[in-house]
Amino acid sequence: MSGSVFGNIFKISTWGESHGKALGVVIDGCPAGVELNEEIIQKDMDRRKPGASKYGTKRSEGDKVQILSGVFEGKTTGTPISLVVFNEDQRSRDYSNIMNVYRPGHADFGFDSKYGFRDYRGGGRSSGRETAARVAAGAVAKACLKELGVDIFAFTRSVGKVSCETFDRDEITANPLCMSDREACEKAAALMDDAMKNGDSVGGVIEGRISGLPVGIGETVFDKLDAVLAKAIMSIGAVKGIEFGAGFSVALLRGSENNDPFVIREGKPEKAANNSGGILGGMSDGNEVVFRAAFKPTPSILIPQKTINRNMEETEIVIKGRHDPIIVPRAVVVVESMAAVAVFDLMLMNMSSRMDNIKNFYNKGV
Amino acid sequence: MSGSVFGNIFKISTWGESHGKALGVVIDGCPAGVELNEEIIQKDMDRRKPGASKYGTKRSEGDKVQILSGVFEGKTTGTPISLVVFNEDQRSRDYSNIMNVYRPGHADFGFDSKYGFRDYRGGGRSSGRETAARVAAGAVAKACLKELGVDIFAFTRSVGKVSCETFDRDEITANPLCMSDREACEKAAALMDDAMKNGDSVGGVIEGRISGLPVGIGETVFDKLDAVLAKAIMSIGAVKGIEFGAGFSVALLRGSENNDPFVIREGKPEKAANNSGGILGGMSDGNEVVFRAAFKPTPSILIPQKTINRNMEETEIVIKGRHDPIIVPRAVVVVESMAAVAVFDLMLMNMSSRMDNIKNFYNKGV
Amino acid sequence: MSGSVFGNIFKISTWGESHGKALGVVIDGCPAGVELNEEIIQKDMDRRKPGASKYGTKRSEGDKVQILSGVFEGKTTGTPISLVVFNEDQRSRDYSNIMNVYRPGHADFGFDSKYGFRDYRGGGRSSGRETAARVAAGAVAKACLKELGVDIFAFTRSVGKVSCETFDRDEITANPLCMSDREACEKAAALMDDAMKNGDSVGGVIEGRISGLPVGIGETVFDKLDAVLAKAIMSIGAVKGIEFGAGFSVALLRGSENNDPFVIREGKPEKAANNSGGILGGMSDGNEVVFRAAFKPTPSILIPQKTINRNMEETEIVIKGRHDPIIVPRAVVVVESMAAVAVFDLMLMNMSSRMDNIKNFYNKGV
Amino acid sequence: MSGSVFGNIFKISTWGESHGKALGVVIDGCPAGVELNEEIIQKDMDRRKPGASKYGTKRSEGDKVQILSGVFEGKTTGTPISLVVFNEDQRSRDYSNIMNVYRPGHADFGFDSKYGFRDYRGGGRSSGRETAARVAAGAVAKACLKELGVDIFAFTRSVGKVSCETFDRDEITANPLCMSDREACEKAAALMDDAMKNGDSVGGVIEGRISGLPVGIGETVFDKLDAVLAKAIMSIGAVKGIEFGAGFSVALLRGSENNDPFVIREGKPEKAANNSGGILGGMSDGNEVVFRAAFKPTPSILIPQKTINRNMEETEIVIKGRHDPIIVPRAVVVVESMAAVAVFDLMLMNMSSRMDNIKNFYNKGV
């Protein structure tokens, strides 16, 4: 098991290396009858695509997704959906500087230790490019969730020390850093320019939000909504932490401060605050699900770094080539995608939780 | 799928409600030949047991674990291990105040919404008591890991605003709050006394550490070591966030600050700092694995709270009975246990990663 | 993974050895709201119980099942159901004749080779007694299926060369061999008496039938209804073959003979014959599902047998003790149970196959 | 879950429809370091390829497999292997005769019932063409097994009433029906010619054999070697039964006849006969594993047939186009492939069965 499969019912199996022929994903368990075509998926692919702004790598790939199976006459058929993106830009390069040397902050050392050798071309399977397949799968999950009235989006909460102070959803897709606050974006851009000038990189935080979830999504013990989301998001390279609702700050609160009283608003149950981030006891509680993930700065920097090589000798490495000075903006859609895959799978799992519902289901005559 | 199964090869299936007849776990996939008896498991059970100090509930349960299968003549046989703890203290109580009312910060509302009704006695399956089964399973995983030279421990990093400043491993088991710093523990105790006096509760942070892991444990994409640990730890009730190594602070750093250079120390590869928390690209990197989890304050407080009832009417609730004023100290061994289950499972998964190793394995004649 | 877990959504995890303290099963994923109590389960346990007739072992166990979790006020709660049967009859015995010797037709040799040692008491985990846990789980699955109008039953099709010629469902529970034909049963009894007189044993065939299944249960490729049933049934010890509908005889037919024309009967689609055994393309086709499993004769016979010991020396073994002269009659309820677990799980999986159904499900307000 | 994923550690996820753009498979969990290239896989693809003889369909596809990921410099890297076959021959056809009519013996009716509509082009996902992906995956599993000294092959045991009387392994690949007996093949060919002349089809039996397996492969309860093989083989379309060793005939035997005494031959433990088919208690027992699967006659025949249409009206159908008059010969390599996938996965699972082996493994320094 190389751990490239995610989900129980809506099960995705991703594949592909940075500089291989192609990347892709097979989705087993997508329900039949969902409207799907390449344009729907491509929209999200384009949000992740490199080269969209000066803060993304210059790699000029089209990242054109193709649907190879599972869709007939514009609708999913219930059979596996195979999505593929062929790598167009595979110029041969000189990898001699990283072939035998372990880049700090990268998987190189672990890979060689685990497998005895590695595909050293651009990080191989551990490249950020791997996330293209996640986005393709996520776009399908989002198409499903949309039919169920569930909305998922993410945005750049902070870049380095610069945080969004205001929230304007339209702004997220309008600025190159995917921030919800234009002013913060401008400050962040200045900070980025400074880092880039020095060949350095910056970290940041992405916030995800999910609304429209029915109450009770997520399972009580190991497959809690937050636990499954945590795995989904933490599995994205460069994420070093995740928190829900009030998050780490709950450790500083008293119970009387942190507990959200339930209230009735417009006839509906809600919580007065949303410290829980929309999740109680591992199940959605009716409020918006809110989480934040911390991304480390891009480990590939132009500044020379100390490290070791395959012979266990200390050495220095100078990394060349195209590298994003920040991972966060391109990762926004990846966070959305993984959240969508996780949440839709839990919604399908939830369908078998009550016998009365199952009886209704089968009496209606499938 | 009610989501009470965890793991791929070392697979645990927990069961039991707070006020049912018993709680327990079945472990499928424990290797044969591991020395195991009830005393080994009981040691960890006793660390979680209520009533150990004034900061734990007064419930005077023996929490005596029994091995019902899978062990023969003091060794595991390779067949499923069934562990059970019978509930001794099942006095009938008056649940009328919570039967039809949703306690803030609890799973009650989600449970009723999901299933149409719930076992309202003491939280049912969503009780902290559910973690007894995790600890039993974790003790078995730890017995296995010990044979492989892997050491896992956890401690209370902070209680409310009081953090450990020093680290003394012996101190962890010597003080009632499981802190690594006696002075901090005393301050925290004062803070706790104040909260208890007011019928309130406090939150805190638990830190976990894993050493002795071979390099390369964890899989490259979805089953990253940190992703699997995140799910394992986030699945513990009351956890609202998790971070690895430098954690959320990486968002504030530049690449040149955050990247750990590899160095050779005493002939062995290590990282100069350990910002990565012992994990790069989802695989163990040879340094100690370090993570921190934020626990919310106990939601059951003695202070009257506003909430709603099953009829969707606003009301007030007064929670009575035995409740820990803090979850953290008793959760320390739970964190260890879940980490042990997660890590041991990944070590077993890793065994099939290389054909040369598989050939060696089978040539040796199983 | 010791392979004691079965199912995807309705997931059972069995445990226990023949002469250990107890045997049992944990069911994760049983829907909430199913009426369940120990009597319902005990009924099936009693059908498998040893000592019911002279053709069963004399072991006088009560085989009393206990529900330890997952049921509240007579209904399943949606949380894991733990079922246990304590072994009452654990007289210490003399195992010296089988401890170091491999019984022909048994798992002994494989066990020692795989694990390095084994629990030699009565076959340990590989005892027929292991099936008690399957029957307990199956009774729960059957209770669920009953609510959905699905009926599963099995009967002894043949004992040695004696086959049922007639079918009377009431007869199945009325005679000691569970045959559908009283006359055949009498002939089979004579055949059994002859075998027993010689210390020998006999084989036979069990037929299973499932009616009331909606069309379309089972998945198209690997999780075909017949493939999943085949695994479920073949996993019962002593089964050496399984066939569906016309079974092995299809190999002798021409397409024009074997193809079942669809017809309309009383306004409903059916097949003229049922050569397919109710399954086409891995999915239920609306007709009764019919399968047959071949059981080998009990390998424990009183006749002295040649074999080898742990030192790889040839030797002779004389098996003593209580052993059924035929496995088949007590296995009838085991076949029903495994079929029920397999089919109910596939029915739950099927619920997420169509987006229109999922939308209906969630709009109805879970 | 559409059930197109098979295996636990060596996990394959197949996709593709008969007349879609392509078919393929993603293999997650193939160990690193296995020599692999397209030629190795193509050899098996060519054995399944249509048009090889007059007994196969005339579809002139190249069935050229491409490796899109997971292989670097001629060796597997431990990351997912994506294999694809593009469909070359996609002439547009007239499907009006099957679009709204349910072909007898086919999945059409089940598909429409389950999903509400279907990809009617050539059977869609339920086409025999789906097995191309299984063969590609199986070729990789066979490459792995070869390194472990495990040999798997299959052959046509019988065609209609004509069975092989002799066994010549070389003959299997030398004659168009993959029989082990040239004389039988000639008789079978005559029988086939007669069926074809009448627009009819014939069934048959495929036998599979596995040698070189270490003792103890397979798990004790649900994941028995025979149970897993049964699921693997029964999941191939058109298989209606499977049996191991003496198979269904054991039902007619007495224990004293069926029990295989263990003997020592050339210093090694073996069984005198091999009635068990190389499997005892669900584990390999050191003898050759032997199984047989019954295949029904091709359901697509040229003879007009009665059936019903989507409006639930009785009608007649005349199937045109290219259809094999027998499924068996092309399915031989499919049987081998599924057996290889199943067995290799169980060998990987077996690696974690003993702590002494695990300790050896990790001390050797991965």
Image (cartoon, coloured by chain):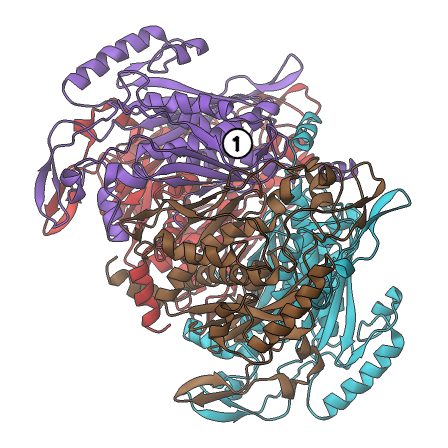
Chain colours: A cyan, B brown, C purple, D red
Kindly indicate the quadrant of the structure image that contains residue B254.
bottom right
- Position of the N terminus of chain B by quadrant: top right
Amino acid tagged 1: Val
Disc 1: which residue? C343
Vertical side of C337 occupied by D362: above or below = below
Outermost residue to the right: A266
Question: Is A15 positioned to the left or the right of B354 in the image?
Answer: right
Residue B272, image x, y percentages: 52, 87
Q: Quadrant of residue B328?
A: bottom right
D171 w.r.t. A207: above or below: above
- Determine whether A54 is above or below C51 in the image: below
Report x, y in % for residue D106.
55, 31
Image quadrant occupied by the C terminus of chain B = bottom left
Residue D178, picture quadrant: top left
Res A310 seen here:
no
Q: Residue furthest top?
A: C183
Q: Residues within 10 Å of mark 1 (few under 14, many from 20)?
A: many
Secondary element at image label 1: helix
All told, the count of numbered labels is 1
Residue B227 visible within the image? yes
Q: Residue at x 26, y 32 (%)?
A: D246
Q: Tell me: B86 left or right of D192.
A: right
Q: Chain of mark 1?
A: C
- Camera-side residue of B217 and B162: B162
x%, y% of residue B300? Answer: 70, 52
* Residue A9 spot, x, y in % from top left: 60, 46
